[in-house]
Image: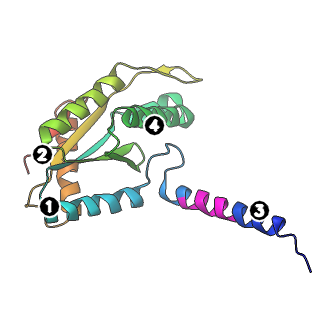
Amino acid sequence: MVYDVTDIASSKRALERANEQLAKLSMTDRLTGLLNRGTWENLVDAEYERFRRYGQATSLVMFDIDHFKKVNDSYGHLAGDEVIKHTAAITKGNLRQSDTSGRYGGEEFGIILPETDAEGARIICERIRENIAQSVVETSVAPIQYTISMGIAQLTKAPENYMQWMQLADEALYAAKEGGRNQVMISGN
């Protein structure tokens, strides 16, 4: 007896491709293509543990879009989505291959910068901030110009877990916002 297994093999490959796509979708933010919060936070935890073991400089960045509610209120949520996508694209375009960015939620993002001290992180963040401040998002409603605020926390031995490290970066972000927005602040740890 002879069996033609072509259909079985092609069905199996199609199933494998579908499973690969599902795995990718479960790890990424649908709007931006960046890692989603859960996946990104797991990598923050892994980087924290790597620092604990090897002690190499590593920095964490938290940032968000300034006055984003005003963008949504003035231009609508679809235009707001375009601003979020633009932010993700500028961020990805200014990172090294070893860096990892994620959408933390809403208009908030995070970046893991391995083997990077606070000053190196500041240089990367300033480049992202300036590129965004100097660009215009052409939406179907109107051209939108906007800014971001960024907070950096270089990891030290002080944080007892990755969540405390994230809190330091978040506090630096809020200091940037309170200091007038459209700027980068480094945590004092």
Q: State the residue position of label 3.
A: 10
Q: Nearer the viewer, mark 2 or mark 1?
A: 1
Q: Quadrant of residue 132?
A: top left
Mark 1 packing: few (<14 Cα in 10 Å), some, or many (20+)? Answer: few
Residue lying at 18% horizontally and 35% vertically, measured from the top left:
122
Q: State the residue position of label 4.
A: 84
Q: Upstream in the sequence, badge 3 or badge 1?
A: 3
Q: Nearer the viewer, mark 3 or mark 1?
A: 3
Amino acid type assigned to the residue bearing label 2 in the image: Ser
Q: Nearer the viewer, mark 2 or mark 3?
A: 3
Instruction: Please say if 165 is above or below 33.
Output: below
Q: State the residue position of label 2.
A: 187
* Label drawn at residue 54: 1
Say which element carries label 3.
helix
Instruction: Where is residue 180? Give x, y as percent.
Output: 20, 29
Label 1 to label 4: alpha-carbon separation: 35 Å
Mark 4 packing: few (<14 Cα in 10 Å), some, or many (20+)? Answer: many
Q: Upstream in the sequence, badge 4 or badge 3?
A: 3
- The foreground one among 83 and 49 is 49
Label 4 to label 3: alpha-carbon separation: 38 Å
> Is 18 one of the magenta-colored residues?
yes
Instruction: Please say if 144 is above or below 26.
Output: above
Instruction: Where is residue 119? Give x, y as percent.
Output: 12, 36
